Image (tube, rainbow, N blue to C red):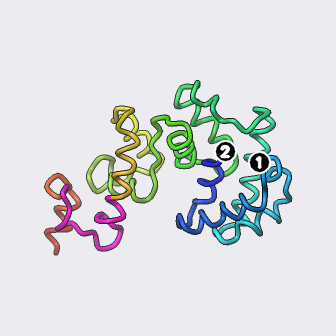
Amino acid sequence: MTELVLTILSQNTTDTNSGRAFMRLHKRFDSWDALAEAPVEEIEREIAVGGLAKQKAPRIKASLAAIREQRGSWDLGFLRDLPLDEAKAWLRELSGVGPKTAACVLMFALGLPALPVDTHVHRVAQRLGLVPPKATPEKAHDILESALDPELVYPLHISLIKHGRRLCRAQRPLCAECPLLDGCPAGQGFAGAQ
């Protein structure tokens, strides 16, 4: 549950802001039951520091209600026993859960080989030619997951995020410093233009 709530809070904000919002929730509500029973307005107040509280609070509350209604507990461990596509589909039925959030829960909380495609992973994969230039993040999830051995999903995810933050930035990528430059179609174009 922690990963699900954290990931909903992380949507369209920084890790710092979503972390603050989660800590406020954790401090205010001593259990998932308490959070599930709280009025939406109270949840909004607690997570306001993370941004988009008016959208995220109802999503969190609705997701908790759906999980409790369908499962009778807060344990998402049952998802490990489902095929990956079914586990993703189950999570995506929850309010505010898209492909990235579902993949984060499955990978980080349950250790399954689901690949979250955030803005960094998407950008780096496109520039390296791992996915087509017009591929949506959702399509990139499917393409990258199907191309990878399951044991490589987690390390690749972490590596692509680090690479996207440090070198392959959205604005002014540092292609001249990139160890992948020789195999990067976009980098060749950027480096030639510099």
176 left or right of 170 in image: left
The image quadrant that residue 25 belongs to is bottom right
Depth check: give the residue in front, 41 or 27.
27
Q: Are marks 2 and 1 in contact (CB under 8 Å)?
A: yes
**For the residue labelled by badge 2, is the local secondary structure a helix, a strand or a loop?**
loop
Amino acid at dot 2: Met
Depth check: give the residue in front, 189 or 69.
69
191 left or right of 140 in image: left
Residue at 47%, 39% in the rendered image? 114
Number of numbered discs: 2
Residue at 44%, 43% in the rendered image? 115
Residue bearing mark 1: 32
Depth check: give the residue in front, 13 or 16.
16
Depth check: give the residue in front, 29 or 181.
29
Residue at 28%, 57% in the rendered image? 127
Where residue 120 appears, as percent x and y from the top left, is 40, 59
Say if the magenta span includes residue 125. no
- The label on residue 1 is 2
- The label on residue 135 is none
Q: Which residues are magenta?
A: 163-180
**Mark nearer the N terminus (2 vs 1):** 2
Say if the magenta span includes residue 169. yes
**For the residue labelled by badge 1, is the local secondary structure a helix, a strand or a loop?**
helix
Where residue 19 appears, as percent x and y from the top left, is 59, 63
Amino acid at dot 1: Trp
